[in-house]
Image (cartoon, grey):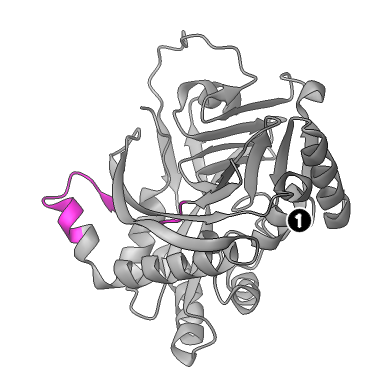
Amino acid sequence: MTKAEFVEKLNTWGKSKIPFLFLVDFEIKNPLAVSLNELDPQTILFDINGFTNAFQSKSTLKEKIVLFKFADHFKTYKQKFDFIKTKLIRGDSFLINLTSKTEIKINKTLEELFTLSRAKYKLWWQDQFLVFSPEIFVQIHDQKIFSYPMKGTINASLPNAREILLNDVKELAEHTTIVDLIRNDLSLVATNVQVTKFRYVEEVKTTLKNLLQVSSEIEGKLPDDYLSNLGTILISLLPAGSVSGAPKAKTIDIIRQAEGEDRGFYTGVIGYFDGQKLDSGVVIRYIEKQENKFYYRSGGGVTAQSLVEKEYQEMLDKIYVPVG
C-alpha cells in the first residue's frame, strides 16, 4: 500500500479501536498493515513483548544454535566508513548509522530461530526474513507516547565493561545526539516532551557473547484525539532516528550513497495495536533469506569521533541470535 493508504487505514482502525499489526520499511516505500483477525500464522508469526499469535510451547529442538559469519573484508567496510566520515567532518551530518549485509551460515530455519530466540520484538515474515529486536521504537497508551532510543554496545565480558561504555566520549556524543533527535521528533506530535531516564544499561544474552547496551527514556503527552491519528503520528516519526541519523533527510541520502543498496524492511518498524495501546520496535537484529542463502544485517552509529576498527567490531558483535 502507499504511504497515504497506510496512514488512512491506521487512523481509521485506531478511531474504531480495531486491533492490527503493521510493518514499515526504512524508506517508507512499502508500508503494510493487517488486522489481527486476518493474520495467518502459517505465513506470519509475531511476538511483541509477549503479545503473540505463535503457539506457546517449549521448543523440542535440542541442537545448539551454530552461526558462522562471512563478513565483508575490513577494507570494504573501511571504504564505506571513510566516505561517511568525510561527510561528518564537513558538517553534512552529525551522526550517520552505517550498516552492512553479512552472509551467514546457520543450522536452523528462520521459523526455528523465531521459536528459539528471545527478544522484545520478534517477527517471522513468510520465510523471507526474521527479526529479533531489543529496541523499542514508540509505545502509546493513556494519551502518552514513549520512546527508548538505544545507542552504545560493548562486550559484557570485558573488565569494567559498564564503566568503559558509559565513560566513552564517542558513545556519549552519539547517544546524546540521538536523544536530542528523538526528543525533537516526539515534539512534532506531543507536548511536554522530556527525558525521564538518561543512559541506563541493559544486558543481552546471545549465542556468542553477552552484550551491554545503553538506552534512554523519553515521553510526551498526546492530544485527546490521538487514537484517530495513529497513522499520522507514526509516519511523522519515521524513519527511526537511532537507525538513520541527524539531520534525517540529508543523512538518509548519505546512507544511500555509502551502502549502495536498499535496506528494505531492515531498520524499519514493526508493531501492533490491541484496540487500546500501541507497541512498536525498530527492525534490527535481522536475518533475510535470498536464493537459499542467509544474510544478517547489522551496523551502528558513526560520529566524527568514531574509530573504524571499533565500528567494524561493533558491526560484527551485533551478528548474533539472542537466546535468553
229 is higher (above) or lower (below) than 208? below
Q: Nearer the viewer, residue 180 or 131?
A: 180
Secondary structure of residue under mark 1: helix
92 is higher (above) or lower (below) than 116? below
What residue is rendered at 77% in x and 40% in y?
14
* Range drawn in magenta: 148-164
Q: In this orientation, does residue 151 appear?
A: no
Q: Position of residue 63 (x, y in %)?
A: 40, 16
Q: Residue furthest left?
A: 159
Quadrant in the rendering for residue 109: top right
Q: Alpha-carbon neighbours of circle 1 within 10 Å: few (<14), some, or many (≥20)?
A: some
Q: Position of residue 128 (x, y in %)?
A: 69, 36
Q: Position of residue 95 (x, y in %)?
A: 47, 74
Q: Nearer the viewer, residue 167 or 114?
A: 167
Amino acid beneath label 1? Thr
What residue is rendered at 82% in x and 35% in y?
16
What residue is rendered at 35% in x and 32% in y?
207
Q: Which residue is mark 1?
A: 232
Q: Is residue 228 left or right of residue 317?
A: right
Quadrant in the rendering for residue 177: bottom left
Number of callouts in the render? 1
**Is residue 157 inside the magenta stretch?**
yes
Q: In this orientation, does residue 115 appear?
A: yes
Q: Quadrant of the C terminus?
A: top left
Q: Nearer the viewer, residue 309 or 322?
A: 322
**Is residue 42 inside the magenta stretch?**
no
Q: Residue furthest bottom?
A: 90
